[in-house]
Amino acid sequence: MTAGERERPAGRGEKAMSSAAAERVYGRHGGYRQLRAYQVAEMLYDYTCRFCERYIPPGDRHCDQMVQAARSGYQNLAEGSEDSATSRKLELNLTNVAKGSIDELQRDYQKHLERRGLRLWQAGEPLFEEARGLRPGTVEAAAAWVNGGGERNRPNGQNGPDGRGRGSAEERAANLGAILAAQAHWLVERLLDRQARDFEAEGGFAERLYRARSQSRGERRTDETDTTEGEGKRETAAGPGTASLSPRPFRPYVSVSPSVSSVPHLPTRPTGGPDQADMRIVSQHSGAPASLRAHIREYRSF
């Protein structure tokens, strides 16, 4: 690859981190827009903004708290997905923060119903089941259901099969917001479960670095082995008259007759003389110079 090719910007639709090395080091990360948990959490933020603009005064602290909780939900999911490239721990932490923020938002919707004296729908009721099965893809679809009185073929205010009224638009909006928050919370919990299983199976960033480096070094050793084998085959084919390119083995220099000055002077033992073993060693070196035998006696006497 030339310098011009390395500096050339990526084309439209081409990933910037598309090399095999980037995939081994950073793994799969990003792609949060394809997560169902992120899609529902982002739509819940848009829905909450419209709900607060219509039903909560701007000066009320609940307006800011609900919007910030909804924003924290989908933004932490996105940030955790991006940060998973270098930190699985940070991804898990941010996903858990998103789960807590969405749970806070659900309780705010429920408290809004309580403060305004509106009814909180319970599981099993027709209105609750209808809202839970709605699963709007956009905030416009959710607003159309709220403003239309719930079921499309039932006029606003007409009683349902259980004899209860359809409730006001504010009651339907708050209950739908609580149901959407509960669904987003469940999806984020499922995402956390999958992230935990991925961490056990693949490890974290440090383990990916080690695997990528080990794989790269293994491939390099394989290339060097193939090159060495190829040179050996070429040398064999060249014949015995060709000079060998392999280095000669190292042979350390050994002095046959060490000089007297190379033997260190060691202090003698203060008392006693050489024993029988000393005399045997001196006799074994009888061919050595007298000065060298004297040093051997001193060494054995120490």
Image (tube, helix red, strand yellow):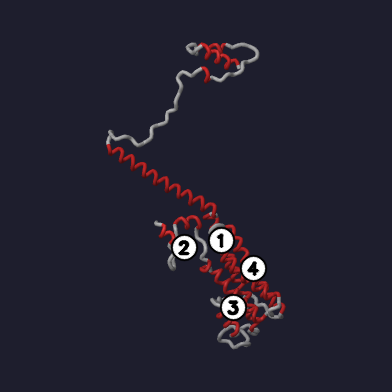
- What is the secondary structure assignment of the residue under circle 4? helix
Residue at x 52% of width, y 11% of height: 290
Spatial CA distance of label 1 from label 3 is 35 Å
Please tell me whether residue 74 is drawn above or below residue 57 in the rendered image.
above
Camera-nearest label, 1 or 3: 1
Q: Nearer the viewer, residue 120 or 217?
A: 217
> Which residue carries the number 2 mark?
16
> Does label 1 or label 2 sit earlier along the sequence?
2
> Which residue carries the number 3 mark?
131
> Which residue carries the number 1 mark?
83
Residue at x 41% of width, y 60% of height: 4
Q: Which mark is residue 26?
A: none
- What is the secondary structure assignment of the residue under circle 1? helix
> Does label 1 or label 3 sit earlier along the sequence?
1
For the N terminus, give its image quadrant.
bottom left
Please tell me whether residue 240 is drawn above or below residue 82 in the rendered image.
above
- Density class for disc 4 (Cα within 10 Å; few <14, some 14-19, many ≥20) is many
